[in-house]
């Protein structure tokens, strides 16, 4: 018989760590493919100086389905010019909340 401690454990596919880095909430323009996959095209966010930043011409290096502590998400490793510099960053789409964030 399973006890309380067994019932509260995360499923084996869940990742217990939380994504790290500086998080920015973004407004993301996506392309939804015929197979139902998401593909980020461009996004806007408010920078540390309060200015609105626009990022386009991204290169997507990888995409993975993630499950952070039971929260389904889609992670994209990207590269683009942000603030005048070529940067690598992650875009994460939280499926249930329908929310995008960028981690640098």
Image (cartoon, rainbow, N blue to C red):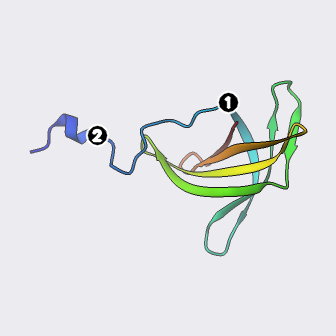
State the mark number for residue 46.
none
- Name which quarter of the figure residue 62 lies in: bottom right
Question: Looking at the figure, which quarter contains the N terminus?
Answer: top left
The residue located at (50%, 50%) in the rendering is 66
Q: Which residue is drawn at 21% across and 35% down?
A: 5
Q: In this view, does 42 lie to the left or right of 23?
A: right
Query: Is disc 1 surrounded by few (<14), some (14 to 19) or many (20+) residues within 10 Å?
Result: few
| Residue 67 horizontal/vertical position (percent) | 46, 48
Question: Left or right of 18: which side holds 80?
Answer: right
Instruction: Label 2: state its secondary structure.
Output: loop
For the point 64% across and 52% down, which residue is it?
76
Q: Position of residue 104 (x, y in %)?
A: 70, 36
Which sits earlier in the primary sequence, circle 2 or circle 1? 2
* Residue at numbered disc 1: 22
Asked if residue 31 is positioned above or below residue 72 in the image, the reply reads below
Where residue 57 sits in the image (x, y, percent)?
85, 55
In front: label 2 or label 1: 1
Residue 69, image x, y percentages: 43, 40
Q: Which mark is residue 9?
A: 2
CA gap between label 2 and label 1 equals: 28 Å
Callout 1 secondary element: loop
């Amino acid at each position: 018989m399973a006890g309380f401690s067994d019932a509260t454990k995360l499923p084996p596919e869940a990742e217990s760590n939380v994504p790290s880095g500086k998080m920015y909430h973004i407004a993301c323009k996506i392309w939804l493919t015929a197979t139902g996959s998401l593909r980020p095209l461009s996004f806007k966010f408010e920078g540390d100086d309060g200015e609105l930043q626009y990022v386009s011409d991204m290169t997507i290096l990888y995409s993975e389905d993630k499950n952070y502590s039971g929260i389904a998400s889609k992670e994209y490793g990207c590269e683009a010019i942000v603030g005048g510099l070529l940067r690598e960053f992650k875009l994460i789409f939280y499926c249930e909340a329908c929310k995008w964030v960028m981690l640098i």
